[in-house]
Image (tube, coloured by chain):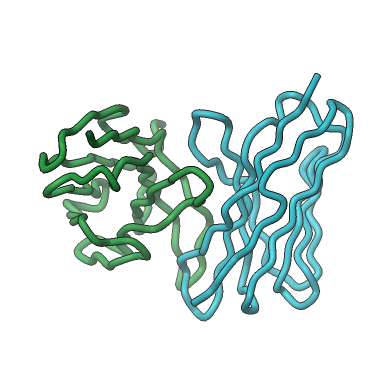
Amino acid sequence: NAGVTQTPKFQVLKTGQSMTLQCAQDMNHNSMYWYRQDPGMGLRLIYYSASEGTTDKGEVPNGYNVSRLNKREFSLRLESAAPSQTSVYFCASSEMRGNYNYGYTFGSGTRLTVV
Amino acid sequence: GQQVMQIPQYQHVQEGEDFTTYCNSSTTLSNIQWYKQRPGGHPVFLIQLVKSGEVKKQKRLTFQFGEAKKNSSLHITATQTTDVGTYFCAGTSGGSYIPTFGRGTSLIVHP
């Protein structure tokens, strides 16, 4: 039972390059999320997907796009990376029943550096 | 928008001492979740509190949800080096199911 799997674990990009962070969960959760974590800033929501076929902006969506490919997979794309996007990125999923969130399961993270 | 404030930002303790982190919200919360993140790791869900005044225990960890559902605390009794990490609270309110995270309290335990 892998839980939430993120790839890659580490990445260095040059300013202006693009890349896609991959995330897959095997817990049959409906909802998936992308967070970024910066020192002293806690976890900030970038985008989320309440269910397959839907995506919504979170607190810090600028410079990112997402795709909910199917129920299992939710990818995050940086079209033109900037140094301000240097961060640790976490994908998460959660079981939802109505409006009740049973708590997140996080992936192990992607440590991204943009130079 | 909803804000969740967490204090202190850092806490140094000697092994065996107690530790408490506090979480305060600007709005009434539907529920509050607590997570632990080990250094270099990812957040791991610990517990969710839903009821006003609720108290839950997990071994040496005690979680409380305030009567007004605007604050919460996590208390660790007799800390161990395995308790090292950052503890986050995450509160949900206003009909949303997306929690807002506090900035976390980093616990450093000196042996």
Q: Is residue B85 left or right of residue A86?
A: right
Residue at x 18% of width, y 44% of height = A81
Q: Quadrant of residue B93?
A: bottom right
Name chain B's colour: cyan
User: Looking at the image, is A72 positioned above or below residue B90?
Assistant: above
Q: Is residue A98 left or right of residue B73?
A: left
Foreground pick, A1 / B28: B28
Foreground pick, A114 / A68: A114
Q: Position of residue A76 (x, y in %)?
A: 22, 48
Q: Is residue B63 left or right of residue A19?
A: right
Q: Position of residue A7 (x, y in %)?
A: 26, 32
User: Looking at the image, is B97 positioned above or below residue B6?
Assistant: below
* Quadrant showing the C terminus of chain A: top left
Residue at x 23% of width, y 40% of height = A22
Determine the residue located farthest toward the top in the rendered image.
B111
Q: Position of residue A61 (x, y in %)?
A: 28, 61
Q: Position of residue A98 (x, y in %)?
A: 45, 72
The number of callouts visible is: 0
* Quadrant showing the N terminus of chain A: top left
Q: Quadrant of residue B80?
A: top right
Q: Quadrant of residue B68?
A: bottom right
Residue at x 62% of width, y 78% of height = B27
Name chain A's colour: green
Residue at x 76% of width, y 28% of height = B109
User: Looking at the image, is B25 positioned above or below residue B76?
Assistant: below
